[in-house]
Image (spheres, helix red, strand yellow):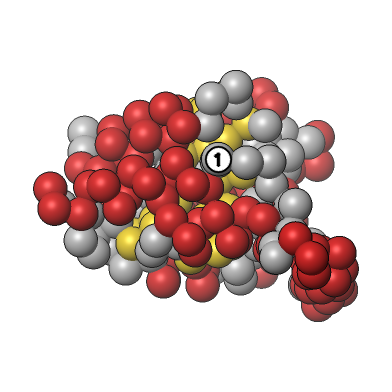
């Protein structure tokens, strides 16, 4: 599994901690750090980061994203507005584990501004550890796992039916938001190299438009 790490600029000082902790516990998986880092020239809100997460996942450039903002709630809601993203909220190890086992989504949001100080570090680390402690999608409780996983598949089917395609959505967004999002060049380059042709082609077209001042 290829895991992307990216969080809002409001929590840029937590990026290194977030990346290193995911890399520590997601052993055997490729972990890619997209920031946001304290030294980046631009700042990005949780809404802008959620659009980048949508492009990463819809384009197949990563399989899973670990993200967050100050509360974690806004990022979770914003990510779930993007096609092909099913994002959970994990303020505790139990929440992280249940999301992985029952809901089996492709993104998880952490409340990086709440209690993740020195006193709360153990909760943070154990949340990441529990998230990756077992293969996703095994269901829980074990005696009712089949029903739980059927419900998860039904939820994903409803979301697919109720959402437009990623590129159709991108074409409907405020052009100013799209321009801001595409300034995050490390994400754009990664999708161009690793993403599906449709998403990558759209990005190339948008970059050409922006360079022409359109």
Q: Position of residue 90 (x, y in %)?
A: 45, 62
User: Is residue 98 in view?
Assistant: yes
User: Is residue 156 in view?
Assistant: no
If the image is split into quadrants, where does the N terminus sit?
Answer: top right
Does residue 126 appear left or right of residue 144 in this picture? left
- Relative to 4, residue 114 above or below: below
Q: Residues within 10 Å of mark 1 (few under 14, many from 20)?
A: some
Residue visible at 78% across and 36% down in the picture: 196
Q: Quadrant of residue 207?
A: top right
Q: Nearer the viewer, residue 161 or 55?
A: 161
Residue visible at 74% across and 52% down in the picture: 137
Query: Going by the picture, which residue comes out furthest to the left?
Result: 118
Q: Nearer the viewer, residue 41 or 126?
A: 126
Task: Identify the element where label 1 is drawn.
Answer: loop
Q: Which residue is mark 1?
A: 133
Q: Position of residue 59 (x, y in %)?
A: 72, 42
Q: Position of residue 30 (x, y in %)?
A: 58, 24
Residue visible at 13% across and 53% down in the picture: 119
Q: How many marks?
A: 1
Q: Position of residue 173 (x, y in %)?
A: 59, 67
Does residue 2 appear left or right of residue 116 in this picture? right
Residue visible at 60% across and 68% down in the picture: 80
Q: Quadrant of residue 93?
A: bottom left
Q: Nearer the viewer, residue 206 or 79?
A: 79
Does residue 36 appear left or right of residue 163 in this picture? left
- Relative to 97, residue 15 above or below: above
């Amino acid at each position: 599994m290829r895991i992307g790490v990216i969080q809002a600029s409001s929590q840029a000082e937590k990026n290194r901690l977030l990346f290193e902790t995911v890399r520590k516990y997601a052993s055997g998986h490729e972990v890619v750090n997209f920031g946001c880092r304290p030294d980046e020239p631009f700042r990005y809100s949780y809404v802008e980061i959620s659009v980048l997460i949508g492009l990463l996942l819809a384009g197949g450039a990563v399989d899973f994203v670990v993200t967050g903002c100050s509360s974690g709630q806004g990022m979770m809601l914003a990510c779930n507005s993007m096609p092909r993203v099913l994002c959970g909220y994990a303020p505790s190890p139990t929440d992280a584990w249940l999301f992985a086992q029952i809901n089996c989504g492709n993104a998880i949001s952490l409340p990086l501004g709440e209690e993740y100080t020195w006193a709360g570090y153990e909760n943070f680390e154990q949340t990441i550890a529990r998230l990756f402690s077992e293969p996703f999608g095994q269901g829980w409780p074990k005696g009712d796992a089949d029903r739980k996983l059927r419900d998860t598949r039904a939820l994903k089917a409803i979301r697919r039916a109720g959402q437009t395609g990623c590129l159709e959505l991108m074409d409907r967004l405020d052009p100013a938001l799209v321009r801001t999002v595409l300034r995050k060049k490390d994400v754009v380059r990664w999708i161009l190299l690793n993403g599906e042709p449709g998403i990558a082609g759209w990005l190339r077209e948008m970059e050409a438009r922006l360079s022409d001042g359109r």
